[in-house]
Image (cartoon, grey):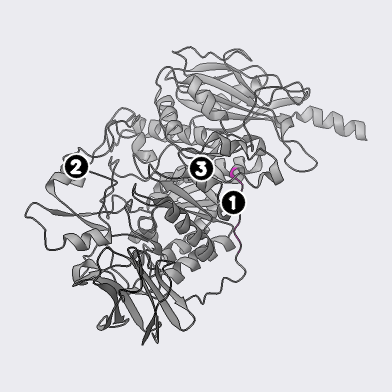
């Protein structure tokens, strides 16, 4: 092998024709590269960085004569092996949750082949107003035996579930971290007592503490992956084969062929350089064709990333973006194709949960969330997520039950804004079970009839439960694995989600690309949306009120080039007592017809609505009903007669 000077950038290992450029940051002068046989992982050679080949703390050299197909590598500092945090791929097929046997926890990396046929792959680029998002953990999604996939808990296993996701109506997948991270962390008893969720050891720090373990130290599983990791490599233990990179690309290509998007969660610790964050995102867009990123961490350069030209058509989700950035992308700009930013916060989640369980004083916030959908930035709405209760647990538990985490139930949030419907945990009481099912449907109606983009967490569509655990970050078992048998036992919930997704897809008035103005700016006799109560046009927003009616005028949106959309009226009664709503009058010759409702015994209410289509309807306690404006049959006959 021949060693020459090389280049300090890019860092890591880069194949250049018939040579490899190595670049490594270290304050040690005794450092270099270790080469191994890729199959046996036996050390073949140590190559120190020549002292002359350095700029500051960056050591670099170009090595020719390496058989990259048969060779693995890592760096060394004195007698310590160090993982290349910028490695593109790692050796072997790491078994999830098993401690590394490699010396001092360093991971040998391999040189990733750039030979991959994308077969003309293109990103779907689905607008936010047409999206239905589904957050999932790659391993937990198919790991359970009931998933009936061949490659359980892997990227390939997710591909096997694409027909299911399409049937549900999902357009966009949000994946919890899929970059390489250490799922086994070592923490001291003191650290465990403070439960630092965002200070998990990286590969390098694990290596540094090896051999220093005290009798009080404990190994803890990091199931979620919100930790500093090797950000350039897909996670080996999420792959069915030994080539995680190719398998991840296969997954992305299969999703795109089926019209689905993939948005990846990336957690960046405070010490991450802003420039490297951008570099990492660029790499996944170019190398893996991903559709977007949910940025997690408190020190993300959100404004700079939003204005990064290389990310101009990549979805970026964060707590919020600077107003000046949002204002630079007005609605309608180039077909609104530049509306790729989206706010992803918790305000919607907790306000709507409190309304769902019947808290006072929530109507002003609910009215805002139902219409909020800024022109320059999308809005991701969710009632449940990986952190906190599942949808089934939200209506089954008043308090968290995290005892299985081994931390005396001290971890996880104490603020859940949940209600158990009369009994804590599992129940056989029919009245409790019926109320829970109705509350789940209420939650789904709140979500799908809000103007922003709906997102659900995996399994919420068929009543998945985590037994009241609202922080299962360390659980790799049936607590976090989806039990697909619930799909059969809760088929009614699954069908309801499909129904709501289909209604939303068919009617753009329910999913506009800008904020509702509550004005008749179209001079059609109706505002784009309006609020109502016991009397038309008069919502009761007093603190005690838990009811609201909202009408959407379809004349402001077209379903196609020829036809405007329909009128919709949604009646929300989250009080425990029945409530009578006034249905606003529709244009001449039209009446209200029931479209969807949460009450399992809704037929009587629907009949009353049919008898008094333009007058009043009584909703039972804790129920939501949706009505659509239709042309009366006699009006159709008269119209047909005039044509004759």
Q: Does residue 126 appear to the left or right of 346 in the view shown?
A: right
Nearer to the camera, 404 or 212 = 212
Residue 543 in percent (x, y) is at 45, 13
Q: Position of residue 89 (x, y in %)?
A: 38, 70
N-term-proximal mark, 1 vs 2: 1
- Segment colored magenta: 122-128
Give yes or no for contact between labels 1 and 2 (Cβ–Cβ under 8 Å).
no
Check the image and report above or below for 283 versus 319: below
Disc with the residue nearer the chain's start (2 vs 3): 3
- Quarter occupied by the N terminus: bottom left
Q: Is residue 582 above or below residue 368?
A: above
Is residue 157 visible in the rendered image? The answer is yes
> How far apart, in angstroms, are the residues tagged by discs 2 and 3?
40 Å
CA gap between label 3 and label 1 equals 12 Å
Task: Identify the residue under disc 3.
Answer: 303
Q: Position of residue 236 (x, y in %)?
A: 35, 67
- Marks 2 & 3, CB-CB < 8 Å contact: no
Q: Is residue 432 positioned above or below 338 on the image?
A: above
Q: Earlier in the sequence, mark 3 or mark 1?
A: 3
**Residue visible at 32% across and 35% down?**
396
Question: Residue 616: which disc?
Answer: none
Residue occupied by mark 2: 403
Q: Nearer the viewer, mark 2 or mark 3?
A: 3
Residue at x-position 38% and y-position 41%: 298
Can you tell which of label 3 and label 1 is closer to the viewer?
A: 3
Q: Which image quadrant: the C terminus? A: top right
Residue linked to disc 1:
312
Q: Residues within 10 Å of mark 2 (few under 14, many from 20)?
A: few
Q: Is residue 163 left or right of residue 108?
A: right
The prevailing secondary structure element of the residues shown in magenta is loop
Secondary structure beneath disc 1?
loop
């Amino acid at each position: 092998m021949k060693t020459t000077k090389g280049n300090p950038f890019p860092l890591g290992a880069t194949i250049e024709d018939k040579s490899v450029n190595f670049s490594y940051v270290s304050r040690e002068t005794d450092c270099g590269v270790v080469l191994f046989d890729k199959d046996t992982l036996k050390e073949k050679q140590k190559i120190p960085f020549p002292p002359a080949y350095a700029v500051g703390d960056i050591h670099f050299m170009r090595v020719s004569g390496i058989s990259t197909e048969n060779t693995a590598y890592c760096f060394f500092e004195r007698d310590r092996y160090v993982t290349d945090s910028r490695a593109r791929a790692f050796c072997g097929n790491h078994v999830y949750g098993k401690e590394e046997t490699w010396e001092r926890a360093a991971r040998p990396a391999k040189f990733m082949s750039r030979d991959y046929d994308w077969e003309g792959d293109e990103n779907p680029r689905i607008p936010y107003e047409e999206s239905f998002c589904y957050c999932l953990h790659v391993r937990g999604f198919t790991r359970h035996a009931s998933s009936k996939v061949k490659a359980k808990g892997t990227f390939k296993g997710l591909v096997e579930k694409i027909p299911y996701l399409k049937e549900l109506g999902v357009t966009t997948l949000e994946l919890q971290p899929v970059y390489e991270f250490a799922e086994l962390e070592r923490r001291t008893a003191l650290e465990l007592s403070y439960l630092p969720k965002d200070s998990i050891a990286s590969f390098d720090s694990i290596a540094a503490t090896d051999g220093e373990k005290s009798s009080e130290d404990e190994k803890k599983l990091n199931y979620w992956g919100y930790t500093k990791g090797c950000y350039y490599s897909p996670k080996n233990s999420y792959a069915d084969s030994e080539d995680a990179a190719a398998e991840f690309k296969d997954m992305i290509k299969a999703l795109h062929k089926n019209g689905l998007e993939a948005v990846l969660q990336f957690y960046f610790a405070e010490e991450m350089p802003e420039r490297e964050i951008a570099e990492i995102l660029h790499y996944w867009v170019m190398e893996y064709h991903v559709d977007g990123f949910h940025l997690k961490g408190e020190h993300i350069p959100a404004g700079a990333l939003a204005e990064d030209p290389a990310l101009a058509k990549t979805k970026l989700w964060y707590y919020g973006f600077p107003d000046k950035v949002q204002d630079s992308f007005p609605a309608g700009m180039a077909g609104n194709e530049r509306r790729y930013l989206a706010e992803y916060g918790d305000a919607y989640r907790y306000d709507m949960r409190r309304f769902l369980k019947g808290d006072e004083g929530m109507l002003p916030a609910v009215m805002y969330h139902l219409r909020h959908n800024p022109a320059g930035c999308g809005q991701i709405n969710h009632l449940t997520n990986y952190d906190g209760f599942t949808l089934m647990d939200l209506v089954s538990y008043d308090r968290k039950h995290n005892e299985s985490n081994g931390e005396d139930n001290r971890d996880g949030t104490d603020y859940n804004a949940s209600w158990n419907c009369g009994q804590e945990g599992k129940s056989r009481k029919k009245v409790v079970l019926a109320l829970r099912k109705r509350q789940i449907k209420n939650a789904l109606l709140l979500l799908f009839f809000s103007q922003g983009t709906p997102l659900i967490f995996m399994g919420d569509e068929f009543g998945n439960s985590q037994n009241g655990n609202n922080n299962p970050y360390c659980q790799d078992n049936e607590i976090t694995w989806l039990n697909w048998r619930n799909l059969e036992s809760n088929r009614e919930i699954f069908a309801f989600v499909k129904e709501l997704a289909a209604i939303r897809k068919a009617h753009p008035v329910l999913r506009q690309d800008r904020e509702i103005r509550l004005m008749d700016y179209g001079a059609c006799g109706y505002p784009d949306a309006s609020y109502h109560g016991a009397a038309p046009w008069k919502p009761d927003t007093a603190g005690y009120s838990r009811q609201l009616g909202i009408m959407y005028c379809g004349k402001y949106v077209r379903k196609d080039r020829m036809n405007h959309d329909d009128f919709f009226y949604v009646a929300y009664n989250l009080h425990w007592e029945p409530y009578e709503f006034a249905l606003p009058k529709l244009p001449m010759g039209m009446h209200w017809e029931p479209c969807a409702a949460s009450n399992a015994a809704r037929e009587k209410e629907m009949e009353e609505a049919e008898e008094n289509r333009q007058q009043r309807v009584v909703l039972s306690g804790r129920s939501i009903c949706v009505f659509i404006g239709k042309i009366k049959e006699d009006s159709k006959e008269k119209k047909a007669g005039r044509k004759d």
